[in-house]
């Protein structure tokens, strides 16, 4: 018995069209997810960069037994970037020639806005840690505060999903959280850490 070695080779037009349609549907589902993923990653990265700077200031304050501060680079706007330094001359201002600069960070992307409250929201905002690692005010009192990082290129419910908060307690404990809704501006128990 002789067998035909020539079998079916290739695909039919219908099989190719079905495969193409499935590929298009999967792409349409994946692209919005990738956009959300990218936005979250960029915001998380910016938040972690500022969080690291704040933790570095606290660590240096305790290590060196002196006040350490985080200030906006331009002195007024967190979105311009920030500088972390040990206040060696105890002037509570940054002097490049005198104070020990720990790190300087350039401005975050233009679509990320950084704001603060308490001492971090003043006309000349700052975050100050004393030698024990406590968050302080320049006047000497304790200073719990919050810094918010938000994307300014989103609207609607995405505003809350695309906002991160850095909370600094009086004790100096630093944590980040995500606001869940418009009523959760303090990042309370309803927020996710």
Image (cartoon, grey):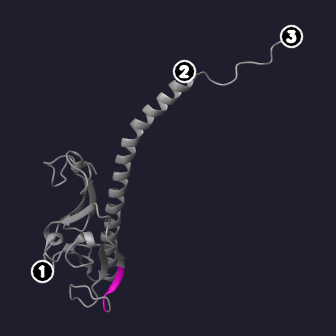
Q: In the rendered image, which residue does mark 3 sit on?
A: 2
Mark in front: 2 vs 1: 2
28 sits left or right of 98 in the view? right
123 sits left or right of 167 in the view? left
- In the displayed image of the protein, which residue is found farthest to the front? 13
Residue 84 x %, y % = 31, 77
Q: Nearer the viewer, residue 107 or 180?
A: 107
Q: Which element carries disc 3, helix, strand or loop?
A: loop
Q: Quadrant of residue 142?
A: bottom left
Q: In the rendered image, which residue does mark 2 sit on?
A: 14
Q: Which residues are magenta?
A: 98-102
Sequence-wise first label, 3 or 1: 3
Q: Nearer the viewer, residue 145 or 169?
A: 145
Sequence-wise first label, 2 or 3: 3
Q: How far apart, in angstroms, are the residues tagged by discs 2 and 1? A: 77 Å
Residue 139 circle label: 1
Mark in front: 2 vs 3: 2
> Is residue 101 a member of the stretch shown in magenta?
yes
Sequence-wise first label, 2 or 1: 2
- In the displayed image of the protein, which residue is found farthest to the right? 1
The residue under the point 30% across, 70% down is: 54
**Magenta stretch: helix, strand or loop mostly:** strand
Q: How far apart, in angstroms, are the residues tagged by discs 3 and 1? A: 100 Å
């Amino acid at each position: 018995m002789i067998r035909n070695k020539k079998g079916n080779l290739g695909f039919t037009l219908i099989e190719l069209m079905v495969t193409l349609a499935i590929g298009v549907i999967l792409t349409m589902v994946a692209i919005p997810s990738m956009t959300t993923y990218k936005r979250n990653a960029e915001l998380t990265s910016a938040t972690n960069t500022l969080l690291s700077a704040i933790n570095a200031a606290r660590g240096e304050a305790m290590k060196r037994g002196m006040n350490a501060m985080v200030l906006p680079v331009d002195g007024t706007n967190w979105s311009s970037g920030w500088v972390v330094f040990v206040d060696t001359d105890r002037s509570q201002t940054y002097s490049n020639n005198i104070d020990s600069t720990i790190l300087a960070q350039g401005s975050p992307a233009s679509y990320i806005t950084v704001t603060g409250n308490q001492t971090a929201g003043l006309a000349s905002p700052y975050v100050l840690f004393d030698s024990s690692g406590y968050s302080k005010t320049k006047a000497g009192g304790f200073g719990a505060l919050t810094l918010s990082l938000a994307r300014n290129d989103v609207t609607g419910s995405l505003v809350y999903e695309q906002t991160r908060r850095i909370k600094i307690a009086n004790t100096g404990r630093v944590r980040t959280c995500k606001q869940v809704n418009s009523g959760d501006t303090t990042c309370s128990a309803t927020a996710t850490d």
